[in-house]
Amino acid sequence: MPRNYTDLSPHDFEILTRDLLQAEFGVLMESFPKGPDGGVDIRLHRNGEESVVVQCKHSPGKTFSQIKGQLESEARKIAGRFSARYILVTSASITRANKAEIATMFSGVMLNEEDILGVDDIENLLRRHPEVETRNFKLWITSSAILDFLVNSELHRRSIRLVEKIVSRRRLYVHSEAFPAALQILEQHHVCVISGEPGIGKTTLAETLLVKLMADHDWQPHIASEDISDIERVWNPGKRQVFLYDDFLGQNSLLDNLNKNEDSRLAQVVERVRNSDNKLLIMTTREYILRRAQQVYEPLHRIPSLGEGKIILNLAYYTREQKARIFYNHVYFAELSSGSHYSILAEKRYRNIVDHPNFNPRLIELVTSNFKRSGVTSVGFYDYVISALDDPSDLWEKIFQSQLSEPERSLLLVLATVRGQLEFGDLLRALNFYQDSSQVSRTSRHQLRLILKKLHGTFLNISSDVRLDDQHNGLHPKNPSTFIGFANPSFVDYISKYLASHPDEIFQMARGCRYFEQAETLVTWETGPESPRWPFEDIISIFFGGGSKGQRRRHHVEPPRLAPGQQNVLMEAMIRLAKSESCYWVKGAGEGLRRGFISIRNRHLAMLRLNSKYGESLLPQHQLAHVAREALERVLSGSLKDVTDEVVLIERLVGYSAISEIVVSLRDAAAMRLMESLGSPVEFRNTLSLLTELDIQASLKSEQAEVELRDRFWDFAEEWDREEALRVNDVPACEEAISDLGETLREFALDGLLGTPKLEERLVLLQEELAEDSEVEEDRDYHSPSFDSLGDKRSTSVVQSGQPGDPIDDLFSTLS
């Protein structure tokens, strides 16, 4: 079955033809734009003259009768013009009789029947030269075989939203230098973390890697949609599996990850993948969130792969020509009018867009997909794009304030406060609750469907056939449900900035919260993320403007922005929703997703963060005492992992003198529980910090626990040094172990008495082995067979504007 050539632009088809003929003839061929000379798209130039001239006619899905008139016109134009061998290549379907008729038609040039190539001939050449398909990225990602596999595979049933997005966006993809670089990282480390600023193309690259591995090497794909347990559940030691975990630290703040409580499990899974020959893991995150997470979460700081296997995706990975293709693809497939095309072609103004310092793939997608709804005339397209690039937030502002009705704006505000996806019924309940609090008319179920239909694409992604299990709300796995989420996460960034400058809106949103997740989001936007070292204004500047866990200190407090009384409403909303049902979903034991639940601890944490922001004046004493007593009950009865998580809450409770007695008991109980299982230097260090570094009075229990802890560590350190020296098998792991134990020895004031002699001996041996392996590696041309067809490293040289043969001009000339 032929590949899907419909998703190739005329430029894509010319590049494909050039690469196939180069491979077939074994020579370098030149490609040219359409121009005044006409009839020459590709040529072979030798000894000062043209020996081969190639003309491309991209007419996918058409028959000879449908393109006959176009060919006759072309034959008349070029008659007698060329003395070189003439080749005609078309993506239309043509028969042997058609070729004879075309040869007669082009009698004015040297066109033989064997030099007339239709879609079947192209298919044959692709089979002869599979490396060409690998280089022509969009061809294999749009192939019918790949799409059929996506739509019918288990991947589709597990992650329908991802598959729908890949299928709908496939023709917009552009192959960048990050692709082979990421493949090389996967080959070496088995784990690739793609990080970068919002909208740069992290998810697109991750999806492309996933599809390529599925297509070429029979890797079984799995999507982590909720947390790392999605990977743990499907792990099969005997299968080749590739895992994709998109936005694994959340989109807006570290609070997203705190809710998952998965930092240690993530570290374990990463190391399992690194040590498995048949497992690959692809993760994406925003770069600034990754940096902060590694400083805040000790297990993440200890994962070597987050540094070694990381590719920071930025505009440096896009050559000027690739950025041009990104813009070109969006313009071409948006089916804009000829007037819109002319507005960017005039005086080659597309160059100003491609070279704009704020060029961003997601922003380009937004302006091209929204233009038809903007009300701007077609000739104003260029100005519209430039204005959006000059001030991206201004574009969202215009769309949000001028192009939407009040119910539509309300829906988007409500959805933004969830920061994820909502089931249709949950969205309707949340929207109606907000409308009731604002004293405006309710949106009916039918009206909501109409709104969703209008906003689908530009603002929203809507997925049907999602299986949910929630009998209380009438949802059963046998009856498909609908999920709604944002098509463009940058809108959530805009809303957070918008509310930061409109505190009265935060007040109204707080009154209208239907789910605790909404109130939690508002607290995050008002106070900043959980880490005291990263105030909210830092996050905003990263969105729109271009110490270690052992350190204990009071939390940084930003100046208040809510007016008196408004912060009380936000706190009242959290108290009101403290035990409410959740609106996010997780995988259940049986069929379908079930409702998740934000832990009481994290709900209390959000309350304490807001209370700290406003001078610890919002929560009454009895409520504070209730929070501390519930924490004490969890420490006494929960698992050791739960106890570790409670330390963050204990830090928040320090300083409330009215409940100091309960907090001391809570600290002592947590320390005693942590001492039940001390298996690593980090656990010793964190327990010591809990006992000595919090601004809280000591007790007889804490003093006795500290003495016991120090005695136990003296015996532990030497034994751990010996055991780790036997376990570690690579230099980074050994260096990490030495650093880990050394830091803990300093914390216990033992660095002059105890050391890491066995680990240091092991490090010397590993370094010597590594040096020997490097010498051997230099003596051979090594290439892993498992990645032979996964793409080549292309030149990153840039052709400057205005030079003869500028490929940017060649590309955009096809729009005319």
Image (cartoon, rainbow, N blue to C red):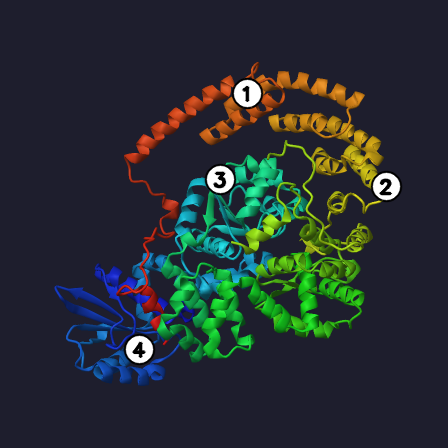
Whichever of callouts 1 and 3 sits on the residue coming sooner in the sequence is 3
**Which amino acid, mark 1?**
Asp
**Residue 392 screen position, x and y as percent:** 53, 63
Residue under label 2: 621
Circle nearer the N terminus (3, 4): 4
Camera-nearest label, 4 or 1: 1
Kindly state the secondary structure of the residue where label 3 is placed: helix
Circle nearer the viewer, 3 or 4? 3
Residue that mark 3 sits on: 307
- Element at badge 1? helix
On the image, numbered disc 1 is attached to which residue? 721
Horizontal relation, residue 518 to residue 630: left or right = left
Mark 3 belongs to which amino acid? Gly
Percent across and percent down for residue 705 are 74, 21
Q: Nearer the viewer, mark 2 or mark 1?
A: 2
Disc 2 on helix, strand or loop?
A: helix
